[in-house]
Amino acid sequence: MRSVLFVCTANICRSPTAEGVLRKMVAERMPGAKIEIDSAGTHDYHEGASPFHMAIEAARKRGYGIEHLVARRVSSGDLDHFDMILGMDRANIMHLRTISPTRCKPKIELLLEYGDKYHGKDVPDPYGGNEAAFDLAIDMIEDGCTGLAELVTHLAAR
């Protein structure tokens, strides 16, 4: 396992948060691990923008720094490059599978397939919501990233 790409709709709330969460979890479990972690959106609504201010604040409260990230749209090169492509919800998964060549479809999964408490659920988009919506999104992302961090650090240790 060398690389993980998180994908949401606009790459300003959920996927950059997941990128920040997994980066920190991997660094704590395996300092110096060479695992590429990135995020992108299915659409270019906010391309070039920083994460949404409420996402930055919610992440900061939990010790994750995402303010330096920049929104971008998933590219065809990403589909081949990344070992795992994890969508935040089923709509993201459907979009990714629509634009992916057949050879890339097996590596597209839902983030919360790796969770325990929220296993198999969609991470709801908190954009336009209140602080509680962002807190719930991070709760769910942390759940998925906990299982994911265990897997990627185990594979990286091989």
Image (spheres, grey):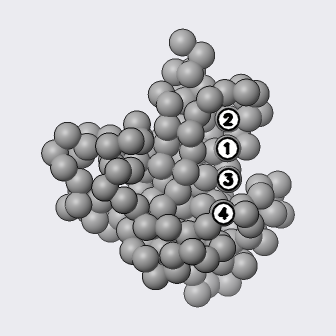
SS type, badge 3: helix
What residue do we see at 61% from left, 84% from top? 129
Q: Is residue 156 above or below residue 16?
A: above
Which residue is labeled 4 in the image? 69
| SS for callout 2 | helix
Quadrant location of the C terminus in the rendered image? top right
**Label 1, on which residue?**
23
Q: Which residue corresponds to the image point at 51% horizontal and 76% vertical from the top-left?
A: 47
User: Given the image, on which type of amino acid does mark 4 rest?
Assistant: Leu
Mark 2 sits on what residue? 26
User: Can you tell which quarter of the image residue 80 is in?
Assistant: top left
The residue that appears at 48% across and 28% down in the rendered structure is 1
Verify CB contact (< 8 Å) between mark 4 and mark 3: yes
The dot on residue 105 is: none
Q: CA distance from mark 1 to mark 3?
A: 5 Å
The image shows residue 89 at horizontal and vertical percentages of 40, 63
Q: Dot 1 surroundings within 10 Å: few (below 14), some, or many (20 or more)?
A: many
Residue 130 visible in the snapshot? yes
Whether the residues at callouts 1 and 3 have beta carbons within 8 Å, the answer is yes
Label disc, if present, on residue 20 of the rendered structure: 3
The outermost residue toward the left is 102
- Tag 4, which secondary structure? loop
Observer-nearest of 137 and 30: 30
Give the mark nearest the N terminus, 4 or 3: 3
**Label 1: element kind:** helix
Q: CA distance from mark 4 to mark 3?
A: 9 Å
Q: Is residue 122 visible?
A: no
Distance (Cα) linking label 3 and label 2: 10 Å
Q: Is residue 80 above or below residue 45?
A: above
